[in-house]
Image (cartoon, coloured by chain):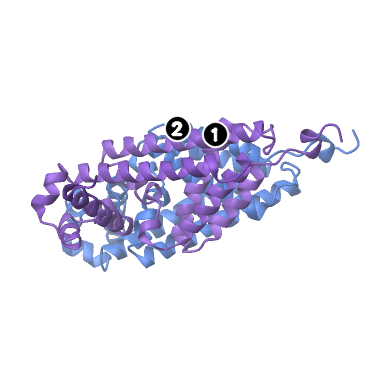
Chain colours: A purple, B blue
Amino acid sequence: MTTQTDSTRDHILTTGRALVAQRGFTGMGLAELLKTAAVPKGSFYHYFASKEDFGCKLLEQYIGQYGKTLTEILEDSAPTARARLLEYWSRWVSSQSSQEANSQCLIVKLGAEVSDISEEMRRLLEAGTRTMTTQLARTIAEGQQDGSIATSVQPALVGPALYQMWLGASLMAKLSRSPNPLLQAMEATLVLLPEPHPEQTSPDT
Amino acid sequence: MTTQTDSTRDHILTTGRALVAQRGFTGMGLAELLKTAAVPKGSFYHYFASKEDFGCKLLEQYIGQYGKTLTEILEDSAPTARARLLEYWSRWVSSQSSQEANSQCLIVKLGAEVSDISEEMRRLLEAGTRTMTTQLARTIAEGQQDGSIATSVQPALVGPALYQMWLGASLMAKLSRSPNPLLQAMEATLVLLPEPHPEQTSPDT
């Protein structure tokens, strides 16, 4: 059940998310957040102990929502694990090609900034990214089981490496205002996640 | 010839670089910079038109120095192009494993932050990274000429993809306060830059 309280809290988080995606965490002034969200200061401090606490809640919400979507894609979106991984990265291309604040990846936007200024926010991002790379590695291993990914690939190495490449590609896409780095990452992903050689899947033919 | 003027300007840039590497560009207050560098405000505005202009000069200096080191490594550090590329990334592991402000990669630290707030700084970073990825791609092509890298690799794809992976690995190393993401990137680099099969280099044996 959504109460008035929950909805004010969510409204502040949603407004803040669009602001930090644009200005960064340090650049988002509390006064601007309160004005944009049209809530009094007392209301903010009712829900959040400090700006840092607000940042933590924002990241928790973001990581929670992202994780849910990732799990849905990696478990259900296509018949083979390889197709599900490629579906995940196709959506990454779409969302990070967009200039819209709400589709911005907050790990790319805030990671380097907050890891030096808030130990709490850094730990949240670290735990979130660890969960994601573990899921990617597991899905690669599933792809080797279902015959969609070559067994020469090391899941525990290639999962994190691909995730890192996509983070860097998103940073480059921001810098260059172009989807090209994301399209290059997709091509490199196809190289790093090869399908088995025909003789590997059908040894009898 | 270094004049008094040059040395004050350089001193402000050096002090500012350590501060932005820690706090980000928005987080570095001008008052703090002036106090840390022990220079009066008028002196700052003698050399820099604005904080953004200072940021641009800082990035120009950083990219210039980085490019010089990169060129030296990629042209001279080892007999084969593949060994020179691996030398470049070995040094990347060392510098980005360090918590020292002056060894921080400013593209990782400032890229996502400044690309949304300063068109001028964004363009400098974009041009700098384009030069770097072009140099990497050229060195991969040289490795195919000197027989150290398999010809199955596409230089124009793998050069940028590797650079992106290393940017993402540096971000993950910052987030996790651990060199592991950089070591994983090195392992993935060895996969993406394979040596030729023996029969490819020595068809007669």
Quadrant the N terminus of chain B occupies: bottom left
Q: In which quarter of the image is residue A54?
A: top left
Find residue A68 and report its horizontal and vertical position in percent.
Answer: 42, 42
Q: Which residue does the numbered mark 2 point to in the structure image? A: B179
The number of discs equals: 2
The label on residue B195 is none
Q: Is residue B196 left or right of residue A119?
A: right
The label on residue A137 is 1
Instruction: Identify which residue is drawn at 49% across, 36% down.
Output: A133
Chain letter for the residue marked with disc 1 in the picture? A
Type of amino acid at the residue the image marks with label 2:
Pro
Front residue of A79/A92: it is: A79
Find residue A46 and report its horizontal and vertical position in percent.
Answer: 11, 45
Q: Distance between the residues labelled 2 and 1?
A: 19 Å
Depth check, mark 2 against mark 1: the one in front is 1
Q: Is B104 rendered above or below residue A182?
A: above
Q: Are marks 2 and 1 in contact (CB under 8 Å)?
A: no
Quadrant the C terminus of chain B occupies: top right
Instruction: Identify which residue is drawn at 79% across, 37% down.
Output: B197
Q: Are marks 2 and 1 on the same chain?
A: no
Can residue A165 be seen in the rendering of this structure?
Answer: yes
Q: Quadrant of residue B87?
A: top right
Residue extending furthest toward the front: A1
**Crowd around label 2: few <14 · some 14–19 · many ≥20 (10 Å):** some
